[in-house]
Image (cartoon, grey):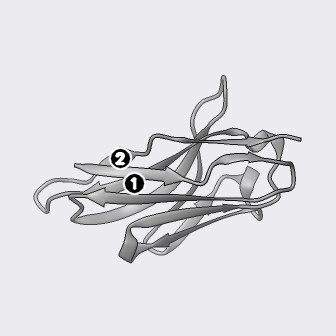
Amino acid sequence: QVQLVESGGGLVQPGGSLRLSCAASGSIFSTYAMGWYRQAPGKQRELVAGTSGGSTNYVDAVKGRFTISRDSAKNTVYLQMNSLKPDDTAVYYCHALIRTVPSRPPSDYWGQGTQVTVSS
C-alpha cells in the first residue's frame, strides 16, 4: 500500500504565500512522477504543476507564481505558492505515479486533499 499525506493548506490573504508538502510512504519500488492538482467548487479537477525526470510543467494560470520541487530521497513533493489570488482557492490534491513491485506497471495514487482559501 502507498499513502500520500499532504500538509500546508490554510487561509491566506491575496498576495500572500503558502507552501504545500506531500510525503509518499509505503511499498514504493520507484516513483515516476509527482504533482499537484486542484479542484474549485463547481469546476473540474485540473493539473496545477507536475515534475518528472527532472522536468517540471505548470498550468498557465500559475506560471511565475508557483514552484514545484521534489526531494526524491524523501519521496516528498512541495508546492511553493506566491502572489496568491482568490482564483487559487480550491482543494489541492497531491498525485504520484508509483510502481510498487518491479513486475507490475505503475499506478496512480492521490492524497486526501488540503484546502487553500485566498480571501481578505
* Badge 1 vs badge 2, beta-carbon distance below 8 Å: yes
Disc 1 residue crowd, few under 14, some 14–19, many 20+, Cα 10 Å: many
Q: What's the distance in space between the residues labelled 1 and 2, CA to CA?
A: 5 Å
- Seen from the viewer's position, the closer of residues 16 and 105 is 16
Q: Position of residue 18 (x, y in %)?
A: 70, 58
Answer few, some or many: residues within 10 Å of disc 2's Cα (few below 14, many 20 plus, some between 14 and 19).
some
The picture places residue 32, in percent across and down from the top left corner, at 35, 63
Residue shown at the point (79%, 40%) measured from the top left: 87
Q: Is residue 86 above or below residue 62?
A: above
Identify the residue under disc 1.
96
The numbered dot on residue 105 is none
Quarter occupied by residue 98 = bottom left
Classify residue 23 as left or right of residue 113: left
Residue nearer the viewer, 44 or 71: 71
* Residue at the (48%, 50%) spot, across then down: 94
Left or right of 88 on screen, residue 31: left
Left or right of 60 in this view: 109: left
Q: Nearer the viewer, residue 101 or 16?
A: 16
Give the amino acid at mark 2. Answer: Tyr
Compare marks 1 and 2 and give the one earlier in the sequence: 1
Label 2: which residue? 109
Q: At which x and y percent is residue 5?
A: 43, 51
Residue, x 39% and y 54% (percent of image)? Answer: 96
